[in-house]
Image (cartoon, helix red, strand yellow):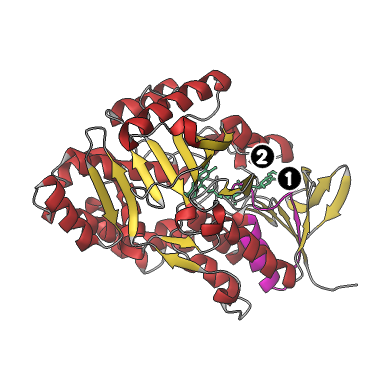
Amino acid sequence: MSNSKKAIVIGSGIAGIASALRLSAKGYEVEVFEANAYLGGKLSLIELGNYRFDAGPSLFTMPHFVDELFRLFDKNPADYFQYVANEVACHYFFPDGTFLPFYTDKNQTVKMVENTLQIDGKPLLNHFKKSEFIYNKTHSIFLENSLHSLKTYFSKDIFSSVLALPFLDIFKTMNQSNELGLNHPKLVQIFNRYATYNGSNPYQAPGILNIIPHLEHGIGSFFPSKGMHSITTSLVQLATEMGVEFRLNSKVSEIVVEGKKVKGVKVNKEMFSADVVFCNSDIKPAYNHLLKSVPKPSKTLSQEPSSSAMIFYWGIKKSFPQLDLHNIFFSADYKHEFETIFNHAAVCDDPTVYVHVSSKIVKEDAPAGSENWFVMVNVPYNSGQDWETMRKVIRSSIIKKLNATLGENIESLIEEEDYLDPIRIEQRTSSFGGALYGASSNDRMAAFFRHPNFSKINGLYFVGGSVHPGGGIPLCLLSAKIATGFVK
Ligand SMILES: Cc1cc2nc3c(=O)[nH]c(=O)nc-3n(C[C@H](O)[C@H](O)[C@H](O)COP(=O)(O)OP(=O)(O)OC[C@H]3O[C@@H](n4cnc5c(N)ncnc54)[C@H](O)[C@@H]3O)c2cc1C
């Protein structure tokens, strides 16, 4: 019998897998319980005929947080997981026919904007620099440490952050900050879009979220050579080699707590004991279903959920040279679009459409001469809307928009089709209302109200997109790093 301490991880989302690896590196014997018949949660796979699609995330930034998991075990990351740096961050298409290909290189983008929009590019360059400034002044405090630990507030980085406070645009909205800094409405729309990277509304969320552009245009935009799902498969391969056990079709029904100490979990009425339990389930179902006898953190649980998504996976029997890996087809009235989502829990007639084509890089994802289109529209989280009807309406709005911009009958080119909506996202990942990133960041104080990575129960930790530091792959990976930092 092994003498090592035992850790249980509930859920195999990216944060669950990263936690399992970090706990294993600390010498724990680790078992991961996953409700689904597959691993990865939102970072999973959909196959339709000869087409392959990543089910959820498509934008990949800060790959070094994946690499460092391999280095924990003195492995060469490239032996398991390869990725490429993208020269183009996104192709932006506007309703008036304007086309702006944003490069990851700031100077190249500024030149392109000067030529296309016939404006001075300096404000844009300064706005990129401001994003870098916000990143440099805040990432250590807000992203890489616990906001709920006193130690963070006695670190050397706190002084630099506090001195920078007046310049972080905390009291402006993202839109206000972008309107003040940029000299063209199209640039404001592009920078407002970054609020969607954590499911928020740029007309409400604070300007400090303008940290996000620096991730793409400073640190870089990347894509895994075998698609996003290879993040899951490569980390699972490493974890399996390190002795982590994955149990599929194993939904945890209770986190067992005695007094103030976690004892283990129950799965199908069977008790599994552990010294530490890491919960990678969304924080709302965790408190509502798994921890019924524990007092609930009401402020945290009552935060406004982030937006969700309606996605169509289309196998398209044609290739489109004007498309890149990431493409945005903007709506004419962005403010109305966000108001409809966040204030009316609905979707407007002319939504912004995101088309991601992984086969631009991963050639095996579609047959020759064809492309795998991941077509996504931001929608509200599920609060009982008629999604069946909404799906049909959204599908025809998308087709109308793409037909007009690309000059093709898109519907006639679709040879495979599936979809994901907030209901399916909730069913498949237990995310409350199908919200993509837990709570939105619309409230200026949202970061402080997210659940800490530790808890009042000894040995119980929380990781994943619904807790600190937030949703998105890099932040989920950081949640695992912060949480395991508290484990002896
Ligand atoms: C459509 C879409 C697009 C996105 N785009 C991007 C993007 O471009 N870039 C980006 O960085 N991020 C993106 N995200 C967000 C990103 O996918 C998430 O932040 C991240 O994958 C969440 O990981 P997680 O660790 O929180 O776990 P999740 O992926 O939410 O998985 C949780 C897992 O826990 C399991 N589970 C829950 N409860 C139990 C239980 N009781 N017992 C056992 N198992 C349980 C679930 O079955 C699930 O497998 C997107 C998300 C979606 C859905």
> Which residue does the numbered mark 2 point to in the structure image?
428
Is tag 1's residue or tag 2's residue first in the polypeptide sequence? 1
Which quarter of the image is occupied by the N terminus? bottom right
Q: CA distance from mark 1 to mark 2?
A: 7 Å
Circle 1: residue type: Asn
Element type where label 2 sits in the image: helix
Element type where label 1 sits in the image: loop
> Which residue does the numbered mark 1 point to in the structure image?
36
- In the depicted structure, whether residue 127 falls above or below residue 245: above
Q: Is residue 265 visible in this depiction of the protein?
A: yes
Q: Residues within 10 Å of mark 1 (few under 14, many from 20)?
A: some
Q: Residues within 10 Å of mark 2 (few under 14, many from 20)?
A: some
Task: Measuring from the top left, give residue 123's x and y in whole percent.
Answer: 13, 52
- The mark tally for this picture is 2
- The answer to whether the residue bearing label 1 lies less than 8 angstroms from the nearest atom of ligand 1 is yes
Front residue of this view, candidates 112 and 13: 112
CB contact under 8 Å: marks 1 and 2:
yes
Task: Measuring from the top left, give residue 351's x and y in whole percent.
Answer: 38, 29
Query: Is residue 40 part of the magenta span, yes or no?
Result: yes
Q: Which of the 4 image quarters holds residue 117?
A: top left
- In the depicted structure, whether residue 104 falls above or below residue 369: below
Magenta residue span: 16-42
Front residue of this view, candidates 136 and 54: 54
Q: Is residue 23 visible in this depiction of the protein?
A: no
Q: Say whether residue 458 is left or right of residue 121.
A: right
Circle 2: residue type: Arg
